[in-house]
Amino acid sequence: MAEEIEFRYDTQLLIEGKDLDEDVITDYITANLVGDCLLAVGDEDLIKVHFHTNEPWKLLEYCASIGEIYDIVVEDMIRQSKGLHG
């Protein structure tokens, strides 16, 4: 039997901006979005975000509000677990 996946979308992106703070970004996502496996690393000009969630659009909306987002990847982990393209 396939492993249960609580959060369907593996969401990754880069945020480019000014005075970005990985701790502030981590705190906001943790307090306001539902998911797991959060990683927000970088410096004040560029942050890489990785997050598993069922609502990737909320993560994208937040990140776009604090800087320019690019290299966006949203992978459907349920499809991947079935051997399908994501």
Image (spheres, rainbow, N blue to C red):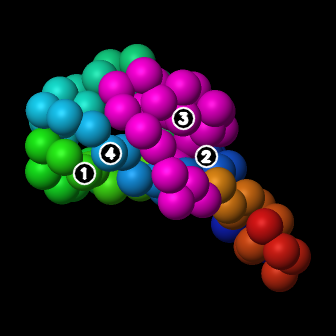
Q: Which mark is residue 16?
A: 4
Would you identify the image quadrant in which residue 41 lies?
bottom left
Report helix, strand or loop for mark 4: strand
Would you identify the image quadrant in which residue 1 lies?
bottom right
**Mark found first going from the N terminus, 1 or 2:** 2
At label 3, counting other C-alpha atoms closer than 10 Å, the crowd grade (few under 14, some 14-19, many 20 or more) is some
In front: label 1 or label 2: 1
**Mark found first going from the N terminus, 4 or 1:** 4
User: Measuring 83% from the left and 81% from the top, which residue is drawn there?
Assistant: 83
Q: Which mark is residue 34?
A: none
Q: CA distance from mark 2 to mark 4?
A: 26 Å
Residue closest to the eye, 76 or 15: 15
Q: Relative to residue 19, is residue 31 drawn left or right?
A: right
**Mark found first going from the N terminus, 3 or 2:** 2
Q: Relative to residue 11, is residue 1 drawn left or right?
A: right
Q: Which residues are magenta?
A: 52-73
